[in-house]
Image (spheres, grey):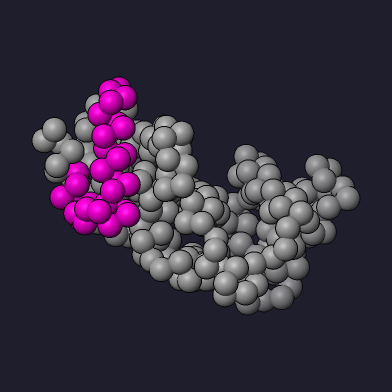
Amino acid sequence: MLENDEDLETLGEKLYDLIYPKYTEMTAKLTGMLLELPVSVVSQMLCDEALLNKALKRALTVLTSSDNSEPVSHTDDAASVSSDSLGEQLFDLIDLYNTGHTQKITGMLLEQKKEAVLQLLSDHSLLEEQVKIALKTLQEQGDEATDVSDSSDRDEVESIGETLFSIVYQLDPTHCADITGMLLEMDSGTLKQILSDRSMLEVAVQRAKSALEGALNPTHTEMSESLQTT
């Protein structure tokens, strides 16, 4: 949030004016929801209509779901939230930052305990900090990797990640976010290969699922190496 209340009010007024023609009856509520996002993201929305529309669509989804269900407020309720549901919510928020690494960052943050992930969903300042840390880590790894050193390759990996997520979701909707994050640890060449070979992809998903369930306990790197040798 902006420290200066006057600046925050100005930002809110600009956002309100943009939202009003689209959703007249819900303008105030939607404006309030978007103003809870990091200032850098809100500022970008003011000059990026596509980003604004994406955020509005997700805000409307939240409003619709909250109207039809009770909010999660108790520890028992929080514990019952599926990891996939958390992954989807986290993915939607991280995607607003336009980092180019939404899939990987989501996978990295989902490795935390469920309570920590729930806190990220409710504390946007903390989420922004975690995203920056994860992005810095990925960028440092990218500097060392020759096959993802330029922006075009990073865009390609992100595109592969989106395709992979949609396919993994069909195979295992319960763990799709975690599994996608694990598979994206592999190099782009291997990712392209498993995307073109359905049986190989199913084997990779099954191994990742087994690792998640504790039947196997390889690290992401070990799993990647084992997949590449098959």
In the figure, residue 213 lies in which quadrant? bottom left
| 190 relative position to 11: left or right | left
Dominant SS type (magenta): helix
Q: Residue at x 75, y 68 (%)?
A: 9
Decide whether residue 225 is among the magenta residues: no
Decide whether residue 220 is among the magenta residues: yes
Most extreme residue toward the right, as rendered?
25
Image quadrant holding the N terminus, namely bottom right
Camera-side residue: 67 or 155?
Answer: 67
* Residue 166 horizontal/vertical position (percent): 46, 34
Camera-side residue: 98 or 40?
Answer: 98
Q: In this rendering, is residue 146 above or below 37?
A: above
Most extreme residue toward the left, as rendered?
229
* Residue 18 horizontal/vertical position (percent): 77, 48
Q: In this rendering, is residue 148 above or below 55?
A: above
* Residue 57 horizontal/vertical position (percent): 68, 44
Camera-side residue: 175 or 164?
Answer: 175
Q: Is residue 125 visible?
A: no
Image quadrant holding the C terminus, namely top left
Q: Is residue 58 visible?
A: yes
Q: Residue at x 18, y 38 (%)?
A: 227
Q: Residue at x 46, y 34 (%)?
A: 170
| 150 relative position to 222: left or right | right
Q: Residue at x 38, y 66 (%)?
A: 112
* Residue 102 horizontal/vertical position (percent): 43, 48
Most extreme residue toward the top, as rendered?
196
How many labels sit on residues? 0
Q: Which residues are magenta?
A: 196-224
| 16 relative position to 105: left or right | right
